[in-house]
């Protein structure tokens, strides 16, 4: 999940699939597939992780809107991770993307989640 998360974060900052694939050493079609699947699920991911952020946070502050829904969803995952680790510091030992994988039961990019 770390590599996929890095790809998603790079896309959220404006990088393209070819650039991300070269940076990660992965086939461009594989990276493009990750980005497309996440993009199709972005609103669901954003909503789910924003609720998690608010429910888990000690003093939650939802992330501000960005320029794209894709970036909003990535920001919500990162914000939820911050909120969860503020309540349970041991969670900070895992990355935001490992938390996302655990919360989604490994189905973050699947059409059937959430």
Image (tube, grey):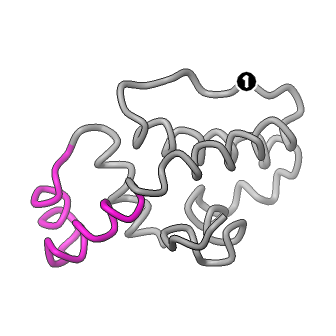
Q: Residue at x 82, y 51 (%)?
A: 89
* Above or below 63: residue 85: below
Nearest to the observer: residue 90 or residue 5: 5
Magenta stretch, main secondary structure, is helix
Taking the image as shown, residue 30 lies to the left or right of residue 3, namely: left
- Quarter of the figure with residue 56: top right
Q: Which residue is mark 1?
A: 61
Start-end of magenta stretch: 15-38
Q: Residue at x 39, y 67 (%)?
A: 4
Numbered disc 1: secondary structure: loop
- Quarter of the figure with residue 31: bottom left
Q: Residue at x 38, y 69 (%)?
A: 3
Residue 62 in percent (x, y) is at 68, 27
Taking the image as shown, residue 31 lies to the left or right of residue 18, namely: right
- Asked if residue 70 is among those painted magenta in the image, a careful observer would answer no
Quadrant of the drawing holding the C terminus: bottom right
Residue 26 in percent (x, y) is at 20, 76
- Asked if residue 34 is among those painted magenta in the image, a careful observer would answer yes
* Above or below 80: residue 38: below
């Amino acid at each position: 999940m770390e590599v996929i998360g890095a790809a998603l974060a790079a896309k959220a900052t404006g990088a393209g699939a070819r650039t991300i694939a070269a940076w990660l050493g992965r086939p461009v079609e594989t990276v493009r597939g990750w980005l497309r699947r996440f993009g199709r699920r972005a609103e669901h991911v954003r909503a789910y992780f924003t609720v998690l952020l608010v429910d888990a946070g000690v003093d939650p502050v939802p992330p501000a809107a960005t320029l794209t829904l894709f970036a909003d969803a990535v920001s919500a995952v990162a914000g939820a991770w911050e909120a969860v680790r503020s309540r349970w510091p041991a969670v900070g030992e895992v990355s935001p993307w490992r938390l996302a994988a655990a919360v989604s039961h490994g189905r973050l990019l699947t059409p059937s989640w959430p």
